[in-house]
Amino acid sequence: MGILIKNGEIITASDRFVGDVYCEDGKIAAVGAGLSKERAGDTVIDASGQLIFPGGVDAHVHMELPFMGTESSDDFETGTAAGVAGGTTSIIDFVIPARGQALLDGLAMWNEKAKKAVSDYAFHMAVTWFGDDTLEEMAVCTREHGIPSFKTFMAYRGAIGVDDPELIQVMEAAKGLGALVTVHAEHGDAVVALQKKLLKEGKTHPRYHAQSRPAPIEGEATGRAIMLARMIGEPIYIVHLTCKEALAAVTEARSRGQVVMAETCPQYLLLDDSVYEKPGFEGAAYVMSPPIRPKGHQDALWAALSSGLIQTVATDHCPFNQVGQKDMGKDDFSRIPNGAAGIENRLALLWTYGVLEGRIDVHRFVDLFSTQPAKIFGLYPRKGSIVPGGDADLVVFDPKGTSTISAKTHHHRCDRSIFEGFEVKGKPTHVIVNGRVQCVDGKLDVERGAGRYLPRRLGPTQGAQAF
Ligand code: URP
Ligand code: ZN
Ligand code: ZN
Ligand code: ZN
Protein backbone atom coordinates (compact mmCIF):
# COMPACT_ATOMS: atom_id res chain seq x y z
CA MET A 1 0.00 0.00 0.00
CA GLY A 2 1.17 3.49 -0.75
CA ILE A 3 1.17 6.65 1.31
CA LEU A 4 0.05 10.00 -0.06
CA ILE A 5 1.05 13.03 1.98
CA LYS A 6 -1.00 15.95 0.71
CA ASN A 7 -0.59 19.72 0.77
CA GLY A 8 2.44 19.98 3.01
CA GLU A 9 5.16 22.59 2.73
CA ILE A 10 8.04 20.50 1.41
CA ILE A 11 11.36 21.82 2.67
CA THR A 12 14.70 20.45 1.50
CA ALA A 13 18.24 21.81 1.65
CA SER A 14 17.50 23.75 -1.54
CA ASP A 15 13.74 23.94 -2.19
CA ARG A 16 10.53 25.03 -0.51
CA PHE A 17 7.06 24.58 -2.00
CA VAL A 18 3.59 23.37 -1.11
CA GLY A 19 2.94 19.96 -2.59
CA ASP A 20 2.35 16.25 -2.19
CA VAL A 21 4.63 13.26 -1.76
CA TYR A 22 3.58 9.78 -2.86
CA CYS A 23 5.43 6.78 -1.43
CA GLU A 24 5.21 3.25 -2.75
CA ASP A 25 7.21 0.10 -1.98
CA GLY A 26 9.37 1.92 0.51
CA LYS A 27 10.45 4.56 -1.99
CA ILE A 28 9.37 8.04 -2.89
CA ALA A 29 7.46 7.55 -6.14
CA ALA A 30 6.44 11.13 -6.94
CA VAL A 31 6.75 14.67 -5.61
CA GLY A 32 4.62 17.54 -6.91
CA ALA A 33 1.46 19.57 -6.53
CA GLY A 34 -1.99 18.04 -6.96
CA LEU A 35 -0.83 14.43 -7.24
CA SER A 36 -3.80 12.11 -7.65
CA LYS A 37 -1.95 8.85 -7.51
CA GLU A 38 -3.62 7.23 -4.54
CA ARG A 39 -5.37 3.93 -4.91
CA ALA A 40 -7.81 2.05 -2.72
CA GLY A 41 -6.10 1.07 0.52
CA ASP A 42 -3.49 3.82 0.46
CA THR A 43 -2.87 5.88 3.55
CA VAL A 44 -3.61 9.55 2.99
CA ILE A 45 -2.05 12.09 5.34
CA ASP A 46 -3.38 15.63 5.19
CA ALA A 47 -0.33 17.79 5.83
CA SER A 48 -2.05 21.17 5.36
CA GLY A 49 -0.34 23.74 7.55
CA GLN A 50 2.51 21.32 8.21
CA LEU A 51 6.06 20.97 6.92
CA ILE A 52 7.64 17.94 5.25
CA PHE A 53 11.37 17.30 5.78
CA PRO A 54 13.58 14.43 4.67
CA GLY A 55 14.12 12.03 7.58
CA GLY A 56 17.10 12.88 9.75
CA VAL A 57 20.50 11.25 9.33
CA ASP A 58 22.48 11.06 12.59
CA ALA A 59 26.07 10.36 11.54
CA HIS A 60 27.41 9.88 15.08
CA VAL A 61 25.76 7.50 17.55
CA HIS A 62 26.87 4.67 19.85
CA MET A 63 24.26 1.98 20.56
CA GLU A 64 25.19 -0.73 23.09
CA LEU A 65 28.82 0.36 23.02
CA PRO A 66 31.10 -1.44 25.49
CA PHE A 67 32.92 1.51 27.05
CA MET A 68 34.67 2.36 30.32
CA GLY A 69 33.65 -0.85 32.04
CA THR A 70 29.97 -0.76 31.05
CA GLU A 71 27.79 -0.53 27.94
CA SER A 72 25.78 2.40 26.57
CA SER A 73 22.21 1.86 27.70
CA ASP A 74 20.28 2.11 24.43
CA ASP A 75 20.55 -0.92 22.20
CA PHE A 76 20.02 -0.77 18.45
CA GLU A 77 16.28 -1.29 18.88
CA THR A 78 15.56 1.26 21.62
CA GLY A 79 18.07 3.77 20.26
CA THR A 80 16.80 3.75 16.69
CA ALA A 81 13.20 3.85 18.00
CA ALA A 82 14.03 6.97 20.03
CA GLY A 83 15.53 8.40 16.84
CA VAL A 84 12.31 7.73 14.92
CA ALA A 85 10.27 9.45 17.65
CA GLY A 86 12.45 12.50 17.06
CA GLY A 87 12.47 12.42 13.25
CA THR A 88 15.79 10.64 12.74
CA THR A 89 15.34 7.75 10.31
CA SER A 90 18.96 6.65 9.64
CA ILE A 91 22.01 6.36 11.84
CA ILE A 92 25.69 5.78 11.38
CA ASP A 93 27.08 3.91 14.39
CA PHE A 94 30.75 3.12 15.05
CA VAL A 95 32.22 -0.35 15.06
CA ILE A 96 34.87 0.02 17.77
CA PRO A 97 37.12 -3.05 17.97
CA ALA A 98 39.15 -3.41 21.14
CA ARG A 99 42.90 -2.75 20.87
CA GLY A 100 44.36 -5.93 19.37
CA GLN A 101 41.03 -7.11 17.93
CA ALA A 102 40.69 -7.51 14.15
CA LEU A 103 38.49 -4.92 12.45
CA LEU A 104 36.44 -7.63 10.78
CA ASP A 105 35.82 -9.39 14.11
CA GLY A 106 34.51 -6.10 15.43
CA LEU A 107 32.30 -5.77 12.37
CA ALA A 108 30.87 -9.25 12.92
CA MET A 109 29.94 -8.26 16.50
CA TRP A 110 28.26 -5.03 15.40
CA ASN A 111 26.42 -6.77 12.53
CA GLU A 112 24.88 -9.08 15.09
CA LYS A 113 23.88 -6.32 17.53
CA ALA A 114 22.41 -4.09 14.84
CA LYS A 115 20.01 -6.75 13.53
CA LYS A 116 17.37 -5.41 15.91
CA ALA A 117 17.43 -1.83 14.59
CA VAL A 118 14.02 -0.46 13.64
CA SER A 119 15.42 1.96 11.06
CA ASP A 120 18.28 1.82 8.59
CA TYR A 121 21.87 1.94 9.80
CA ALA A 122 25.41 2.19 8.52
CA PHE A 123 28.77 1.88 10.25
CA HIS A 124 31.97 3.82 10.49
CA MET A 125 34.95 1.60 11.37
CA ALA A 126 37.13 2.76 14.26
CA VAL A 127 40.82 1.92 13.95
CA THR A 128 42.00 1.62 17.55
CA TRP A 129 45.45 0.19 16.82
CA PHE A 130 47.46 -0.52 13.67
CA GLY A 131 48.66 -4.10 13.17
CA ASP A 132 50.14 -6.06 10.28
CA ASP A 133 46.70 -6.81 8.83
CA THR A 134 45.01 -3.46 9.43
CA LEU A 135 45.68 -2.02 5.99
CA GLU A 136 44.20 -5.06 4.28
CA GLU A 137 41.24 -5.07 6.66
CA MET A 138 40.57 -1.41 5.92
CA ALA A 139 40.56 -2.30 2.23
CA VAL A 140 38.06 -5.10 2.84
CA CYS A 141 35.84 -2.76 4.88
CA THR A 142 35.85 -0.18 2.10
CA ARG A 143 35.52 -2.49 -0.89
CA GLU A 144 33.43 -5.38 0.40
CA HIS A 145 31.42 -4.03 3.31
CA GLY A 146 30.54 -0.52 2.17
CA ILE A 147 32.43 1.17 5.02
CA PRO A 148 34.48 3.97 3.47
CA SER A 149 34.88 6.04 6.66
CA PHE A 150 37.31 5.34 9.49
CA LYS A 151 37.30 6.77 12.98
CA THR A 152 40.30 7.55 15.12
CA PHE A 153 40.38 8.70 18.74
CA MET A 154 43.26 10.97 19.74
CA ALA A 155 41.84 10.79 23.30
CA TYR A 156 41.25 7.69 25.45
CA ARG A 157 44.95 6.79 25.64
CA GLY A 158 45.56 3.25 26.81
CA ALA A 159 42.10 2.15 25.64
CA ILE A 160 40.73 2.88 22.15
CA GLY A 161 42.99 5.89 21.45
CA VAL A 162 45.75 5.91 18.84
CA ASP A 163 49.09 7.69 18.88
CA ASP A 164 50.33 9.93 16.08
CA PRO A 165 52.24 7.24 14.16
CA GLU A 166 49.06 5.13 14.14
CA LEU A 167 46.95 8.10 13.07
CA ILE A 168 49.36 8.74 10.19
CA GLN A 169 49.10 5.11 9.12
CA VAL A 170 45.30 5.28 9.14
CA MET A 171 45.34 8.46 7.06
CA GLU A 172 47.78 7.02 4.54
CA ALA A 173 45.74 3.83 4.23
CA ALA A 174 42.51 5.80 3.82
CA LYS A 175 44.07 7.95 1.16
CA GLY A 176 44.99 4.89 -0.86
CA LEU A 177 41.41 3.61 -0.56
CA GLY A 178 39.61 6.87 -1.29
CA ALA A 179 38.14 6.65 2.21
CA LEU A 180 37.49 9.40 4.74
CA VAL A 181 39.14 9.69 8.15
CA THR A 182 37.12 11.09 11.03
CA VAL A 183 38.83 12.21 14.21
CA HIS A 184 37.93 12.67 17.87
CA ALA A 185 40.42 15.45 18.55
CA GLU A 186 41.71 15.87 22.09
CA HIS A 187 45.36 15.71 23.18
CA GLY A 188 45.17 12.29 24.84
CA ASP A 189 48.41 12.46 26.81
CA ALA A 190 47.64 15.94 28.12
CA VAL A 191 44.26 14.71 29.37
CA VAL A 192 45.91 11.83 31.24
CA ALA A 193 48.43 14.21 32.82
CA LEU A 194 45.69 16.60 33.97
CA GLN A 195 43.52 13.78 35.30
CA LYS A 196 46.46 12.51 37.38
CA LYS A 197 47.26 15.96 38.73
CA LEU A 198 43.65 16.75 39.69
CA LEU A 199 43.06 13.37 41.33
CA LYS A 200 46.32 13.70 43.28
CA GLU A 201 44.98 16.98 44.66
CA GLY A 202 41.86 15.12 45.83
CA LYS A 203 39.67 16.66 43.11
CA THR A 204 37.21 13.89 42.28
CA HIS A 205 33.91 15.74 41.54
CA PRO A 206 32.42 15.62 37.99
CA ARG A 207 33.40 19.30 37.44
CA TYR A 208 37.02 18.19 37.24
CA HIS A 209 36.20 16.09 34.19
CA ALA A 210 35.80 19.40 32.33
CA GLN A 211 38.94 20.83 33.92
CA SER A 212 40.94 17.82 32.79
CA ARG A 213 39.99 18.45 29.14
CA PRO A 214 40.04 22.23 28.58
CA ALA A 215 39.40 23.77 25.16
CA PRO A 216 43.09 24.32 24.17
CA ILE A 217 43.59 20.55 24.43
CA GLU A 218 40.91 20.11 21.76
CA GLY A 219 42.23 23.02 19.70
CA GLU A 220 45.76 21.60 19.64
CA ALA A 221 44.61 18.13 18.60
CA THR A 222 42.28 19.52 15.94
CA GLY A 223 45.15 21.54 14.46
CA ARG A 224 47.51 18.57 14.62
CA ALA A 225 45.04 16.22 12.93
CA ILE A 226 44.41 18.80 10.22
CA MET A 227 48.14 19.27 9.70
CA LEU A 228 48.68 15.50 9.35
CA ALA A 229 45.80 15.29 6.87
CA ARG A 230 47.36 18.16 4.94
CA MET A 231 50.75 16.44 4.92
CA ILE A 232 49.20 13.26 3.56
CA GLY A 233 46.75 14.99 1.24
CA GLU A 234 43.67 13.38 2.73
CA PRO A 235 40.32 15.00 3.53
CA ILE A 236 39.43 15.00 7.22
CA TYR A 237 36.19 15.17 9.22
CA ILE A 238 36.36 16.39 12.81
CA VAL A 239 33.64 14.86 15.00
CA HIS A 240 31.90 16.66 17.88
CA LEU A 241 33.75 19.97 17.63
CA THR A 242 33.01 22.07 20.71
CA CYS A 243 35.18 25.18 21.00
CA LYS A 244 36.61 28.36 19.48
CA GLU A 245 40.15 26.95 19.52
CA ALA A 246 39.15 24.03 17.30
CA LEU A 247 37.10 26.32 15.07
CA ALA A 248 40.17 28.50 14.57
CA ALA A 249 42.10 25.48 13.29
CA VAL A 250 39.27 24.59 10.89
CA THR A 251 38.97 28.19 9.69
CA GLU A 252 42.68 28.44 8.99
CA ALA A 253 42.68 25.18 7.02
CA ARG A 254 39.61 25.99 4.97
CA SER A 255 40.96 29.43 4.14
CA ARG A 256 43.91 27.62 2.52
CA GLY A 257 41.51 25.41 0.57
CA GLN A 258 42.16 22.26 2.58
CA VAL A 259 39.24 19.82 2.65
CA VAL A 260 38.23 19.85 6.31
CA MET A 261 34.73 19.07 7.48
CA ALA A 262 33.37 19.42 10.98
CA GLU A 263 30.43 18.27 13.05
CA THR A 264 29.01 19.61 16.29
CA CYS A 265 26.19 18.41 18.57
CA PRO A 266 23.19 20.11 20.24
CA GLN A 267 24.71 19.84 23.72
CA TYR A 268 27.70 21.96 22.70
CA LEU A 269 25.39 24.57 21.15
CA LEU A 270 22.94 24.80 24.03
CA LEU A 271 24.66 24.00 27.34
CA ASP A 272 27.51 25.67 29.21
CA ASP A 273 29.81 24.30 31.88
CA SER A 274 27.61 25.50 34.75
CA VAL A 275 25.91 22.08 34.32
CA TYR A 276 28.85 20.57 36.23
CA GLU A 277 27.84 22.60 39.32
CA LYS A 278 24.48 20.85 39.68
CA PRO A 279 23.89 19.56 43.21
CA GLY A 280 25.26 16.25 44.41
CA PHE A 281 26.49 13.98 41.66
CA GLU A 282 24.03 15.30 39.01
CA GLY A 283 26.88 16.87 37.01
CA ALA A 284 27.90 13.33 36.05
CA ALA A 285 25.02 13.22 33.55
CA TYR A 286 26.96 15.80 31.52
CA VAL A 287 30.27 13.99 31.61
CA MET A 288 31.15 13.44 27.97
CA SER A 289 34.23 14.05 25.87
CA PRO A 290 34.95 16.71 24.89
CA PRO A 291 33.16 18.30 27.85
CA ILE A 292 30.50 21.03 27.84
CA ARG A 293 32.33 24.36 27.41
CA PRO A 294 32.24 27.67 29.31
CA LYS A 295 29.90 30.42 28.08
CA GLY A 296 31.12 32.06 24.86
CA HIS A 297 31.92 28.98 22.80
CA GLN A 298 28.25 28.31 21.99
CA ASP A 299 27.73 31.53 20.01
CA ALA A 300 30.86 30.80 17.99
CA LEU A 301 29.49 27.36 17.10
CA TRP A 302 26.12 28.78 16.01
CA ALA A 303 27.92 31.29 13.82
CA ALA A 304 29.97 28.46 12.29
CA LEU A 305 26.75 26.56 11.48
CA SER A 306 25.28 29.52 9.70
CA SER A 307 28.48 30.36 7.80
CA GLY A 308 29.06 26.78 6.66
CA LEU A 309 32.28 26.26 8.60
CA ILE A 310 30.55 23.35 10.38
CA GLN A 311 28.66 21.06 8.00
CA THR A 312 26.68 18.66 10.21
CA VAL A 313 24.94 18.40 13.56
CA ALA A 314 25.01 14.87 14.98
CA THR A 315 24.23 13.80 18.54
CA ASP A 316 27.06 11.50 19.70
CA HIS A 317 24.17 9.62 21.34
CA CYS A 318 25.88 7.43 23.98
CA PRO A 319 23.62 7.17 27.03
CA PHE A 320 24.56 5.90 30.47
CA ASN A 321 22.19 5.74 33.44
CA GLN A 322 23.03 7.79 36.49
CA VAL A 323 22.13 4.83 38.69
CA GLY A 324 24.37 1.84 38.10
CA GLN A 325 26.58 3.40 35.41
CA LYS A 326 27.56 7.06 35.94
CA ASP A 327 27.87 6.29 39.66
CA MET A 328 30.86 4.05 38.92
CA GLY A 329 32.75 7.35 39.12
CA LYS A 330 31.29 8.60 42.41
CA ASP A 331 34.76 8.91 43.91
CA ASP A 332 36.76 9.54 40.74
CA PHE A 333 35.53 11.67 37.81
CA SER A 334 37.84 9.76 35.45
CA ARG A 335 35.75 6.62 35.99
CA ILE A 336 32.41 8.20 35.04
CA PRO A 337 31.36 6.63 31.72
CA ASN A 338 31.60 9.36 29.06
CA GLY A 339 28.47 10.12 27.06
CA ALA A 340 24.82 11.16 27.10
CA ALA A 341 21.54 10.58 25.28
CA GLY A 342 20.32 12.86 22.51
CA ILE A 343 19.18 11.10 19.35
CA GLU A 344 15.50 11.93 19.97
CA ASN A 345 16.08 15.63 20.57
CA ARG A 346 18.15 16.79 17.60
CA LEU A 347 15.35 17.97 15.32
CA ALA A 348 13.37 19.71 18.05
CA LEU A 349 16.40 21.54 19.45
CA LEU A 350 17.83 22.62 16.09
CA TRP A 351 14.41 23.78 14.94
CA THR A 352 13.53 25.67 18.12
CA TYR A 353 16.89 27.18 19.01
CA GLY A 354 18.30 27.38 15.49
CA VAL A 355 15.53 28.20 13.02
CA LEU A 356 12.99 29.89 15.29
CA GLU A 357 15.67 32.01 16.97
CA GLY A 358 16.91 33.15 13.56
CA ARG A 359 20.36 31.55 13.80
CA ILE A 360 19.95 29.29 10.75
CA ASP A 361 17.36 29.25 7.96
CA VAL A 362 15.11 26.32 7.13
CA HIS A 363 17.31 25.05 4.29
CA ARG A 364 20.42 25.14 6.41
CA PHE A 365 18.48 23.27 9.08
CA VAL A 366 17.63 20.43 6.65
CA ASP A 367 21.20 20.45 5.38
CA LEU A 368 22.72 20.06 8.88
CA PHE A 369 20.10 17.56 10.02
CA SER A 370 19.88 15.29 6.99
CA THR A 371 21.38 16.28 3.65
CA GLN A 372 25.01 17.00 4.52
CA PRO A 373 25.55 13.92 6.66
CA ALA A 374 24.05 11.86 3.82
CA LYS A 375 26.27 13.55 1.23
CA ILE A 376 29.51 13.47 3.19
CA PHE A 377 29.15 9.81 4.13
CA GLY A 378 27.87 8.44 0.83
CA LEU A 379 24.15 7.92 1.51
CA TYR A 380 22.86 10.66 -0.78
CA PRO A 381 20.41 10.87 -2.59
CA ARG A 382 18.95 7.64 -1.22
CA LYS A 383 18.87 9.40 2.15
CA GLY A 384 18.86 13.13 2.87
CA SER A 385 16.58 14.24 0.05
CA ILE A 386 12.98 14.16 -1.15
CA VAL A 387 13.31 12.89 -4.70
CA PRO A 388 11.61 10.12 -6.67
CA GLY A 389 13.62 6.95 -6.18
CA GLY A 390 14.89 7.96 -2.77
CA ASP A 391 13.95 5.97 0.33
CA ALA A 392 10.59 7.03 1.78
CA ASP A 393 12.00 8.46 5.02
CA LEU A 394 10.00 11.58 5.83
CA VAL A 395 8.99 13.78 8.72
CA VAL A 396 5.65 15.58 8.68
CA PHE A 397 6.16 18.38 11.17
CA ASP A 398 3.49 20.53 12.77
CA PRO A 399 5.15 23.82 13.74
CA LYS A 400 2.40 24.65 16.25
CA GLY A 401 2.54 23.86 19.95
CA THR A 402 5.18 23.61 22.65
CA SER A 403 6.46 20.71 24.70
CA THR A 404 9.13 20.18 27.33
CA ILE A 405 11.94 17.66 27.09
CA SER A 406 12.17 15.33 30.09
CA ALA A 407 13.67 11.98 31.04
CA LYS A 408 10.16 11.13 32.26
CA THR A 409 8.77 11.20 28.73
CA HIS A 410 11.69 10.62 26.36
CA HIS A 411 12.16 7.33 24.52
CA HIS A 412 15.86 7.09 25.40
CA ARG A 413 16.62 4.20 27.73
CA CYS A 414 18.27 6.54 30.19
CA ASP A 415 17.28 7.91 33.59
CA ARG A 416 18.49 11.44 32.85
CA SER A 417 18.07 13.96 30.04
CA ILE A 418 20.80 16.54 29.59
CA PHE A 419 18.07 18.73 28.05
CA GLU A 420 15.67 18.30 31.00
CA GLY A 421 13.23 21.24 31.08
CA PHE A 422 14.12 22.60 27.62
CA GLU A 423 11.01 23.90 25.87
CA VAL A 424 10.74 22.97 22.22
CA LYS A 425 8.28 24.14 19.61
CA GLY A 426 6.45 22.04 17.04
CA LYS A 427 6.33 18.25 16.79
CA PRO A 428 6.57 15.52 14.19
CA THR A 429 3.00 14.32 13.59
CA HIS A 430 4.04 11.48 11.27
CA VAL A 431 7.44 9.90 10.86
CA ILE A 432 7.66 7.64 7.83
CA VAL A 433 10.49 5.13 7.69
CA ASN A 434 11.06 3.08 4.55
CA GLY A 435 7.53 3.78 3.38
CA ARG A 436 5.78 2.85 6.62
CA VAL A 437 4.32 5.30 9.13
CA GLN A 438 6.24 4.41 12.31
CA CYS A 439 5.31 7.28 14.59
CA VAL A 440 2.08 9.27 14.85
CA ASP A 441 1.82 12.14 17.32
CA GLY A 442 4.60 10.72 19.48
CA LYS A 443 3.22 7.16 19.48
CA LEU A 444 5.70 4.69 18.09
CA ASP A 445 4.72 1.77 15.90
CA VAL A 446 8.16 0.42 15.07
CA GLU A 447 9.25 -3.04 14.08
CA ARG A 448 12.26 -4.69 15.69
CA GLY A 449 14.67 -5.73 12.95
CA ALA A 450 13.00 -3.76 10.15
CA GLY A 451 16.09 -1.58 9.75
CA ARG A 452 18.46 -2.49 6.94
CA TYR A 453 22.21 -2.19 6.72
CA LEU A 454 23.27 0.62 4.40
CA PRO A 455 26.49 -0.09 2.51
CA ARG A 456 28.09 3.18 1.45
CA ARG A 457 30.38 4.46 -1.26
CA LEU A 458 32.13 7.79 -1.43
CA GLY A 459 32.65 9.80 -4.58
CA PRO A 460 36.17 10.43 -5.83
CA THR A 461 38.35 11.87 -3.06
CA GLN A 462 37.97 15.59 -3.01
CA GLY A 463 41.05 17.60 -3.90
CA ALA A 464 42.95 17.56 -0.65
CA GLN A 465 46.35 19.14 -1.29
CA ALA A 466 49.54 17.64 0.10
CA PHE A 467 52.40 19.91 1.24
O1 URP B 1 31.77 11.17 25.74
C1 URP B 1 31.58 10.67 24.65
N1 URP B 1 31.63 11.45 23.59
N2 URP B 1 31.32 9.36 24.54
C2 URP B 1 31.19 8.60 23.36
C3 URP B 1 32.50 8.26 22.74
C4 URP B 1 33.05 9.41 21.97
O2 URP B 1 34.10 9.93 22.31
O3 URP B 1 32.44 9.82 20.99
ZN1 ZN C 1 -2.68 11.06 10.45
ZN1 ZN D 1 34.37 11.08 20.60
ZN1 ZN E 1 31.10 9.46 19.80
Image (spheres, rainbow, N blue to C red):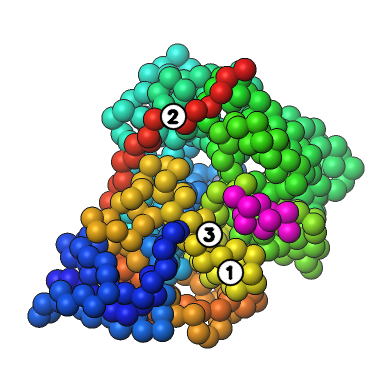
Q: What residue type is labelled 2?
A: Thr
Residue at horizontal 46 percent and vertical 68 percent from the top: 86
Q: Are marks 3 and 2 in contact (CB under 8 Å)?
A: no
- Note whether 132 is above or below 63 in the view shown: above
Q: How far apart are marks 2 and 1 (CA)?
A: 32 Å
Q: Is residue 313 magenta?
A: no
- Note whether 102 is above or below 108 in the view shown: above
Q: Judging from the image, what secondary structure is the residue with disc 2 in?
A: loop
Q: Distance between the residues labelled 3 and 2?
A: 24 Å
Q: Which amino acid does label 1 sit on?
A: Val
Q: Position of 256 compared to 219: left or right?
A: left
Magenta part of the protein: which range?
Answer: 299-308
Whole-percent x and y of residue 279? 79, 68
Residue at horizontal 60 percent and vertical 73 percent from the top: 356
Q: How far apart are marks 1 and 3 (CA)?
A: 9 Å
Q: Judging from the image, what secondary structure is the residue with disc 3 in?
A: helix
Figure quadrant of residue 140: top left
Q: Name the quadrant of the N terminus.
A: bottom left
Q: Give the class, few, some or many, for how many residues have Cα within 10 Å of label 2's Cα (few <14, many ≥20).
A: some
Residue at which label 2 appears:
461
Residue at which label 1 appears:
355
Q: What residue type is labelled 3?
A: Arg
Q: Does the residue labelled 3 lie within 8 Å of ligand 4?
A: no
Residue at which label 3 appears:
364
Residue at horizontal 38 percent and vertical 36 percent from the top: 458
Q: Give the class, few, some or many, for how many residues have Cα within 10 Å of label 3's Cα (few <14, many ≥20).
A: many
